[in-house]
Every structure is written in structure tokens, then in C-alpha cells.
Image (tube, rainbow, N blue to C red):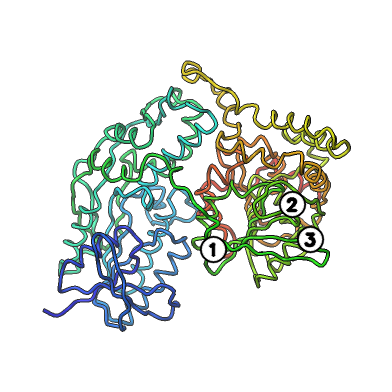
Amino acid sequence: MPTKTILVTEPANPIQRRLAIRLLLRPELRIVCFRAGANAQEYPLREITAGHEELRFRNCDHTSVDEVWHSKNPAHSFEESRAAMQRVLPFVRQGKVSVIHYVSTSQRTEETLGGENGSHAGKTAQSKEEECDFWNERALEESGCRFRIYRIPLFMEEISGATNAWTRFVLLLRRFREEIEGRIPGYFTANALRIHLSEEGTVSLARVDDIIHALEETSMRSDLTSRQFHISVREPMPLSDYFPPLARLTGLRLQVVSDEKQSNLVDRLFAVRMREFLPYLTGKSTTSMAPGNGGEFFQIPQATAQDLLRVTGATGSSSHAATFDWKAGFERKQLVFPEGVPLNYYKGGRGEKTLVLINAYGQSFGYWEKFIHAMSAQTRVVLWIPRGNEFETPGQKLASPHRTHADDLDRVLTNENIASCTLVAWCSGPKLALEYYSRYSHRVSSMVFIAPSFKGLARYKALETDYEKNLEPLLETVEKYPETAGVVLEYLRGILLAQSKQTRSIEQLASISDKELQDALTAVNVNLQELVLEPFCAANVVAYAKQMHDFWRHEFLPGLDAVAVPVLFVGGDCDRIASQAIAKAVAGVIPRAKYLEIKGGTHYIHYEQWDMLAQVVEDVVNAVGEVSPSAVRGLTEPSEKSMTMRQGRE
């Protein structure tokens, strides 16, 4: 029997990986994939071999390919996914491949599809994966190639993969519990998480092996009359049937309520976070079929609650269980100026594009660990440290003007031969990023400002937070009378951690009001208390006070309306450190700026929402031209209130 060669384009995709393992059991098949790192015009292949439940690879000579299996790589952005399809289609045409099989999503809401004509222009309801699949399907239909599209249901995989909607939903539950209980300890011990659904629907959830069996069986058909295959489950289960295993996996008791009045502030916050998953949890989704292509339905068994425990339970019950040593992949670098002052920085990551992280003055990189780990997998990352500071020691050792810090940063980028980068700046960092842009705009392709602080604008003094109002006189006292540092620091620690020190009984937690919840959600996460206090010690507080004095008085408004690169502001409505009302006003001055508000977000979004932030920054880094609202869900234009500064300057 002649050997048939199958190209699996994305073995990192869990479905393609398992499919490759399954196909390798058939001796008449040879399985290959593209060799990593090859440029888009070349198609070197590697042969895939298998051990037990894993893939191995070896180089092979270029060979003709009979069939291609393609799907989205879970790590790819929308632009990367589109580029991958644009690479695969010429290969299929040139190689006279008999058919390209595309594994897509099956469940889409009417809003996602954009109505009768299928246009999704201006729609933001779909997930990034669905948007990529939608574009890829259209590209296939217009390619002239012979193809088959397989739309698959939700499936279960290990939480560490997190590549499909159901797995991301389970991960969201775990992360939401950590986020809330980090600020309100014990909250979910006393309260269920209430999900408001006007009508409880059913969930179509499948085992991966059942999906693979269906893909293999349908792909073996010789006729190409049907070009779309819709794999669905028999007898979907009510969502509530999965609540007991979900409680064991996440530590959350879930409850469906039909009246929104039964939901409190925490429940409504979760409703915002789970909006992407709502169609999958209500049974309201619909299967899309392109006009004239027909389609066949293939039914497989529904996954049970025990299946859920067996598969997703393998990775434990807490996302904090995964800790990352980001420093292991980073190199310490140092520049020394003629006057002997050291300038330290970190360099790491991989990829063609560069991200430069500008931390808040005096702060540790401990907040950023998971974000850095996520971004460095596909992006080069430079971590700037203020001159005079050591690699590990937080706190401001030496106060310098903004122009000096900007020049220092340019020396770092020049030393690393970085011609273009995205600046990601937190808290006090955005002011420095804007100063750098005003002096070295040729190096900046885009900027992301996280929980930005723009204190110091007399016109917006009334919009400052209580923390900002109290901090200035405290640090002025330290600057004038260094001997008072101990007393001032103790008072400052009390302000920072006041709400975090509150303890509540089970009874108090069960009857907590929305007003109390709103106040509690602004508290410093209990896991961050040491990091928050680290910069404030007697040894360096005078230098910190001088640096903040310069920060508050630094003039940055002139030239804002000339910023010509995309700027994304990311702020939280529970930030009690930096005034986001002022940040919105500043966003209104910058022509290409947009403001993304995170409901329930604090000043420490990069710690509590690191994965969301990594996706947002990835979208900005890879954006061509403007940051697209469809690429960043929840993005809003500056509000009318934020436009007043621009109008006042015109």
C-alpha cells in the first residue's frame, strides 16, 4: 500500500496534536509538520514520530503532501493566525494537495456572525479564537482550494493549555476566586457565586478523543460534496449538572439565579468577565453554515461531570500553583557612565518585536512576574531600572530629572540595537514614557499605560485620589525633615494597607452590602502587601521623596496632541492609588489614544489580571496601524468628560 503524507500545520494545537498521535497509528500514513523558524517563502518539513502520548520530530527531505490539516495555533494573535493561513494556502496550491482540512469553532452567536451576510465588522462579542476562525474560513472559501471545514464543540483539556472556551471558563473561575479573596479573604466561604441567566441553558461539552474519532471518520470519506461538517454532542447537559465538579476544581459554589436583583456587586463583576462565555453556557449559540456549501452533522457523546474531574483536575485547583522564575531567561546588563553611576537593566525573551517595560519609581518587578513570563515567550523584553538602583533592591536610590531617565533609556536601547519598540509603563512610568517619546519618537511604535498616574495637574487637583492628596505633604515633610522618616513611613503604611487589615466573620461576609463590597474591592491584595511596602524604608525614602517631587512637577502636556503612535490606557475602576479620572482626561488629549477600563481592576492590574493584560499588550504590539476595538474586548473611546482637557487647550 503506497504511503500517504499528511501535513499537520499546528501541532501546538491540542486537537491537531491528538489527531497526529491518532494518525500515527496507521502504518500507511506519514505525518509531517513545518519546521519552526523557516521564513514564509520556504516550506521545510519535519517528520513527526510518536512516543507515548507525545510527539517527536526529525528532519526530512522535502516531500509531496497529499492532505493538509490546519487550525489556529493557540499562541497566535489574530495577525499571526491570518499570516499562517496565508502561508498555508500557497503551499496547498503549489503542491497540488488534494484537500485542506480546517478545524474551526462550531458555536457562534448571531451577534458574532453579524447577521445574515456574515459580516462581523464592528462586532466585539466573539473571542479572539472565534474571530481568527471566522477570517480563516472566509479565506478558505475564497481560495479556490478544495477544502473541508470541521466545526467542533467545546472540549475539555488540561487547564495549563487554556486554548478553548470551556477551559478558559474554568480558569476564569479559579482566577476570579483568587482575585476576590485576595482583597476580601474568605468571601466565597460564605457566599456562592451567582450567575444570572434568564433561562438556564445546556452545555455542549465533549471529550477530545470523541472529537478526534469524528474528525478521522468524516475525513476518510472520498466524496467532497459536503464541505462543512458540524460535530455536535448528543443530549447536552444542563449547566448546573457541572456545578459539583466545578466546585471541587475551583473552590466556588455556583448558583444560577433568574432575577438580577439576587446578584450583588461581586456577581455582577463576574458577569462582565464571563460575557465572552455566555453563549456557550446558555445553549443560545447557533451553527454557522456558509450559503451553498451545505453541511453534514456528526453527533458524539456528551462529556460527563466525572470526565471533567478526570481531565481538568489533573492540574490542581489553584492557578497560583504555577510559579515562574522569569529571571532564568533574562540576562543582567550594565552600563557605567564616566561619573561612575551604574545603569542596570534586564534583557530577555525572544521574537522579532521588542517590549520595553518602564516600572513605577522604586517598585520591584515582583508584580510583573507572570506577565513577563507570558510576554517573553514571543517578544523580546527589556526591563528598565532607574540609574543608581541595583538589580534586585526596590526603592529609589537616586533621584534624577525625567530628561535624565529618558536619556538613560535611550542609551539602553542604543546598546541593544533596538530600532523600534512598544513602551509598557505603569503608574509613574507613563509620564517618563511620554518624555522619552518627545525626545526619541523614532524608536517608539506604540505605548501601553497601565493604571497611569498623572498627579500634578493643577486644573485636575480635585480629581486626585485621597492617596495622592495625602502622599504629597507626607513626602514633603520627609524631604525637609529626614529625621521624621520613621514616623511618616508608619503613617504611610497605615494608609496603604488600611482596608486590607479588616477581618470579617462568616456572618459579616454573608450579609456584606454592595457599598461595603465596593470599598473592599479597592483594598490592596493580601498577597501584595510586602511588595507594596518594600519601597518605603528609611534608607531610601528621602531619594524617593525627591524623585516624586520631580515627577509631580514635570511638565508633560505640551506636545501631547502631536503624539502620532497608538496609545492604549488600561485602568481599573477600583484604583484608589492613581486617579483614573485624570488618566481619562489625558487620554482625551492624545489623538490616537484609547482607554480600556477594567471593571473591578485595582492599581495592580499587571498582577491580578496579568493574562488579560498580556493579551491586550500582544494585540497592541502586533497591531497594524490603529489598535482595533475588535482585538481588545471592552475598549472604549475617551468619554465626553475626558475630552474637556482637549477642548480647553484648543
Q: Residues within 10 Å of mark 3 (few under 14, many from 20)?
A: few
Q: Which mark is residue 349?
A: 1
Q: CB of mark 3 within 8 Å of CB of mark 2? A: no
Q: Which quadrant does the N terminus fall into?
A: bottom left
| Cα separation between marks 1 and 3 | 27 Å
For this orientation, the residue located farthest to the top is 507
Q: Residue at x 42, y 25 (%)?
A: 189
Which three-letter amino acid code belongs to the residue tagged 3? Val
| Above or below, comparing residue 276 to residue 619 in the picture | above
* Quadrant hosting residue 39: bottom left
Q: Which mark is residue 341?
A: 3
Nearer the observer, 110 or 262? 262
Give the image location of residue 20, x and y in percent. Answer: 25, 65
Give the image location of residue 540, x and y in percent. Answer: 77, 44
Which circle's residue, 1 or 3, is located before the other in the chain?
A: 3
Closer to the observer: label 2 or label 1? 1
For mark 2, give the secondary structure: helix
Q: Residues within 10 Å of mark 1 (few under 14, many from 20)?
A: many
Residue 548 shows in this picture: yes
| Above or below, comparing residue 343 to residue 597 in the picture | below
Give the image location of residue 121, x and y in percent. Answer: 48, 56
Which circle's residue, 2 or 1, is located before the other in the chain?
A: 1
| Cα separation between marks 2 and 1 | 25 Å
Which circle's residue, 3 or 2, is located before the other in the chain?
A: 3
For mark 1, give the secondary structure: strand
User: Is 370 on the left-hand or right-hand side of 12?
Assistant: right
Q: Residues within 10 Å of mark 2 (few under 14, many from 20)?
A: many
List the residue tagged with mark 2. Answer: 431
